[in-house]
Image: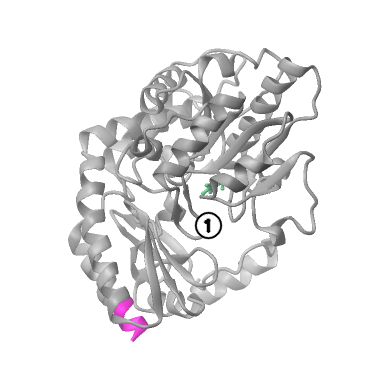
Amino acid sequence: MNTEQWIQEAEQVLMHTYARFQIVLESGDGVYLYDVEGKKYLDFAAGIAVFALGYNNKEYNDALKAQIDKLLHTSNLYYNTPAVEACKKIVKATGLDRVFLTNSGTEAIEGAIKLARKVYFNKHGKADSQIIAMNHSFHGRSMGALSVTGTPKYREAFGSIDGVVFADYNNYEDIASKVNEKTCAIIMETVQGEGGLYPANKEFLQKIRALCDEKGILLILDEIQCGMGRTGTMMAYEQYGVKPDIVTMAKALGCGVPVGAFIAKEDVAAAMVPGDHGTTYGGNPFAAAAVSKVFDLFASEKVLENVNEVSAYLEEKLDALAAKYDCIKERRGLGLMQGLEFTMPVRDISVKALEKGLIIISAGANIIRFVPPLVIKKEHVDEMIAILEECIA
Ligand SMILES: *Cc1c(COP(=O)(O)O)cnc(C)c1O
């Protein structure tokens, strides 16, 4: 079947929750994807910041296949060895103490919210806590995660859980003014992704950390998108000299295998006791083996070094584009998580880029988001810039 036939069949069975691009992807290799007609695309989206190691990494695939032949699933009623190994590596990477593995980023956020609420409940004996979340944040689409997502139009039709207060990101005064005796946590992305590629200011985040310490409030950092090396350090917060009480991870954590995690400091994690939280699939041997191998490959393939080298080059090239074209307002971002804000909607540019064999995505209407595999090289940046410039011009 060709592209058109596949799309026609898809549209009969898929729920209409996405305005999909009109291509049907079939395989991938390195930083390139191929559609059902054999057309090749340079990928600067990585399945939305997921495929850090690039497609079809042999060592990774072999590890997955080996685990498939051993044991796929056990449930969390028993221990399994891949989960122990994965969680040890997550603890080391985050500098926190205890891990709960989930199937997605959204579920990691749900867990983080429940954990923060439980800590408050243990202290006050009541479940009337509040969480301060950021305007323009994105934390996921389930009811809890959606309730702390700062885009009113996503929430409008669905309502919210109780006890969420919104404040402006990078605005210490606004957040501090919303703290009260019911505040159990402040949740934010270290670098806002969907909301427009805004990194937290260093001084801001340090002051928020100090505020949380002073008031006994938990700091939840969502590093689902910006964690796992994307900004040049394993966790983005390393660059800020702060540590959260709870961090959420997903996306590149499994590099294509659906897995997430929320991780907490010892005294915070202690609030959860058997019966408080659970998942059937979360942290199953297959997903855990994936996570474990991802960490190994980050080390052996020197992924962080590559991110630092290539992201400096990408910034330079994007800055040059921004200087050259009036329709580009600014570049911003951190590491290989970059955005170009235009003065007009960018959907047409993304569609044109696809025709020319480049996959790019947006973040909001006017911003092109660059979240490529973390193994891209400078030559791929050149290739991307050349196509992008044709589309802009
Ligand atoms: C993608 C994303 C989520 C949601 O993760 P899913 O795996 O799609 O459930 C939450 N927070 C941030 C910052 C994200 O980028």
**Residue 76 rendering spot, x and y as whole percentages:** 60, 19
Magenta: main secondary structure? helix
Which residue is nearer to you in this view: 34 or 159? 159
- Residue 66 drawn above or below residue 205: above
Quarter holding residue 240: top left
Q: Residue furthest bottom?
A: 393
Q: Secondary structure at mark 1?
A: loop
Tell me: is circle 1 under 8 Å from ligand 1.
yes
Residue at which label 1 appears? 194
Residue shown at 48%/25% (left/top)? Answer: 285
Judge whether residue 82 can be spotted in this image: yes
Quarter holding residue 41: bottom left
**Residue 368 rendering spot, x and y as whole percentages:** 43, 68
**Number of numbered discs on residues:** 1
Residue shown at 58%/51% (left/top)? Answer: 138
**Residue 234 rendering spot, x and y as whole percentages:** 34, 36
- Residue 112 drawn above or below residue 36: above
Q: Is residue 321 left or right of residue 35?
A: left
Magenta region:
387-393
Quarter holding residue 233: top left
